Amino acid sequence: MSGSREGSKIITLVVLLIVLIISCGFFASSETALMAVNRYRMRHQARLKKRSAILVLKLLQRPDRLLGIILIGNTLFSVLCSAIATLISIALWGEQSVWIATLLLTLVLLVVGETAPKTLAALYPEKVAHIVAFPIYVLRQMFYPLIWLVNILSNSLLRLIGVKMTHNLSESLTSDELRTLVHETTGSIPPRYQSMLLGILDLNKLTVNDVMLPRRTIKGIDLNSSWDAIYSHLTKITQEWIPFYREDINHLVGILQPRDLACFLMEKKELNAETLLSLLRKPYFVPEQTPLNIQLHNFQKKHEQIAFVVDEYGEILGALTLDDILEEIVGEFTINIVEPKTVIQIQSDGSYLVDGMLPVREFNRFVHWDLPITGPHTMSGLITEYLESLPRPGICVLIQKYPIEIIEVKANRVKTARIFPRIL
């Protein structure tokens, strides 16, 4: 009978030891899963009223209490495992076998109670977090006084070494972190929408100066011209807005929208110099360093669609439309005033013949290259800056390993240039 009782006792201890080892694995996997889980995904699921996600977020609100219950449980069960393994080894092989049992238990706990469950939790943090959230939450509520005491002691120790305890740490993402997050969603978001999201995030990095239509490419009408000349220009200009000025663009008078002119003519009114002035809209000016995201808001606020970019002296540098900003987000969708096919010509040797007034950003977008865009905005300005002298036909310059040959010069500006692919 005594042998039977001894056998039953050992079996009971073995079963209890297995349960304790599994419990150690439970706490180990809980720690890894809850610390590694994607909190933004949890918040999304919580908005969908998923109970386990709500519990996960509640646990993560106080990581000190979460770690408190996990470490208390892990430590307690590890000590119990050691005690029971010692009892089993003494009962089976005597006191001299204790050190063997300790080594075996250490190996088992390391594999079954730590490494394997933590690896599993690291591979599938969301699934494991949903499973462990409820039992961990219940245990945290049950042993709150003990957790509170442990946290008081540990937090006091941290304060002694100069660590400030803050529980509500900000988890907001910066624009660069959001950009990285969007890049990492390849496959989850279609490339087109991914590009649009990146375009929105890049708006605060760009200014109106970066995407404006350069002054020299703005086609307008001089009001000092004869009425016949003005009327002739009106019949030839096909752009969606027409600036009117006196002598030069710096003396801008107003903007004519073709639809305003169409409505006027539909009313069968007589068009002359005086009535034309009544159709002009007041020009809207913006500083050259205005960020694109702010300018987009200003367009919405002021119900404007075109702005003229000015420098600190009030000189007009170029024009910017609402479409220009939207194209930075969604890509090109309108017909530009300067058609790419007329200013970018693909050559048989793989090079590109470009107009000097072509914006560098437009060229990069068209050919998917990366010429510098932080300095001058036109190809002519970029080439002249790198030359550090007046351009002359036949001169070549290497810009970020892109060979560029000046083909034609007019009025000290590069009129035409040939750009070759990057030298590897």
Image (cartoon, grey):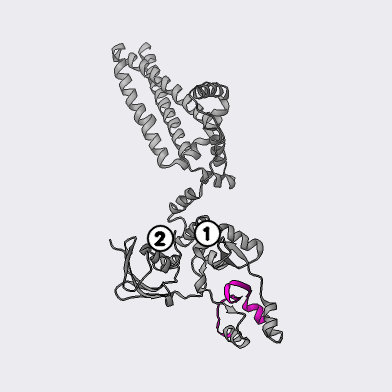
Name the amino acid type tagged 1: Thr
From this viewpoint, is residue 283 visible? yes
The answer to whether residue 8 shows anywhere in this view is: no
Compare marks 2 and 1 and give the one earlier in the sequence.
1
Classify 182 as above or below 397: above
Report which residue position mark 2 lands on: 372
The number of discs equals: 2
Secondary element at image label 2: loop
Q: Say which element carries label 1.
A: loop
Q: Position of residue 79 (x, y in %)?
A: 42, 20
Residue density around tag 2, few if under 14, some if 14–19, many if 20 or more, within 10 Å: some
- Which residue is label 1 attached to? 207
Tag shown at residue 243:
none
Q: Is residue 253 magenta?
A: yes
Task: Name the quadrant containing residue 110.
Answer: top left
What x and y, as percent, mark residue 142? 57, 26
Q: Is residue 376 above or below residue 266?
A: above
Residue lying at 63% horizontally and 69% vertically, measured from the top left: 283
Relative depth, front residue between 146 and 382: 382
Inter-mark Cα distance, 2 to 1:
15 Å
What's the amino acid at mark 2? Pro
Which image quadrant is residue 340 in? bottom left
What range of the chain is rendered magenta?
Answer: 235-262
Q: Is residue 118 above or below residue 145?
A: below
- Is residue 252 in the magenta section? yes
